[in-house]
Image (cartoon, helix red, strand yellow):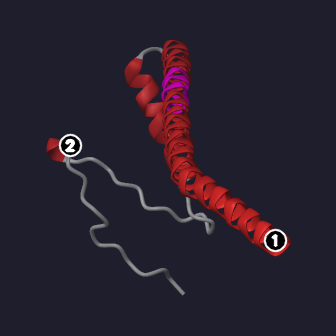
Amino acid sequence: MRGVGLTLGSIVGLVAVLAIVLIGFPTYNVYSKQMAGRAAYEEAVQNRRIRVLEAQAALDSAKLTAAAEIERAKGANEANRIMSEALGGPEAYLRWSYINMLQETAGKDGRQTIYIPTEAGMPILEAGQRPPAR
């Protein structure tokens, strides 16, 4: 009888394990899917926060860049005003600026092309330019 009891006990144990597996496995699948869904949701929320922070940083950067450009323009405007007043008005400042530009763009060999305005303010562009003398 001892062999039958062992076999009956084994069968009861096997049925109990099988019942636990049949009930526990679907429950675990549901739990696993819920956890995966929560993880995906939290990841989406985190990605959204990151995009919002990046957009905010870009906006702040654009505002600061614009403010810096405005300040630079104010400084250039003030410098031009001071220079214009020092030279005796806007016409004198423009003449000085033109002469300064000619000096800065002069060729390394000392030769330069100067455009002289003629009638109607239109220059004659390099008319009759001769090759350098040898």
Question: Three-letter amino acid code at disc 1?
Answer: Met
Circle 2: residue type: Gly
Q: Which residue is mark 2?
A: 121
Q: Residue at x 50, y 82 (%)?
A: 133
Residue 42 position in % (x across, y down): 55, 37
Of residues 56 and 16, which is closer to you in this image? Answer: 16
What quarter of the picture does the C terminus occupy? bottom right
Q: Which residues are magenta?
A: 57-67
In this rendering, position of residue 53 left or right of residue 114? right
Q: Residue at x 37, y 23 (%)?
A: 91
Q: Is residue 37 above or below residue 109?
A: above
Task: Report the residue at 54% width, 40% height from top.
Answer: 100
Name the residue nearer the viewer: 130 or 6.
6
Question: x, y (%) of residue 21?
Answer: 61, 58
Q: Nearer the viewer, residue 42 or 76?
A: 42
Mark 2 or 1 closer to N-term? Answer: 1
Q: Please, is residue 48 above or below residue 71 in the view?
A: below
Spatial CA distance of label 2 from label 1 is 127 Å
Residue 120 in picture, x, y percent from top left: 14, 43
Mark nearest the camera among 2 and 1 is 1
Question: Relative to 40, does residue 90 appear above or below in the rendering?
Answer: above
Q: Residue at x 42, y 15 (%)?
A: 89
Q: Quadrant of residue 110?
A: bottom right
| CA neighbours of label 2 inside 10 A, class few (<14), some (14 to 19), many (20+) | few
Q: Which residue, given by chain and number where applicable, does mark 1 sit on?
A: 1
- Magenta run includes residue 17: no
Query: Who is closer to the viewer here, 80 or 88?
Result: 80
The quarter in which the N terminus is drawn is: bottom right
Left or right? Give the position of 46 relative to 11.
Answer: left
Quadrant of res 12: bottom right
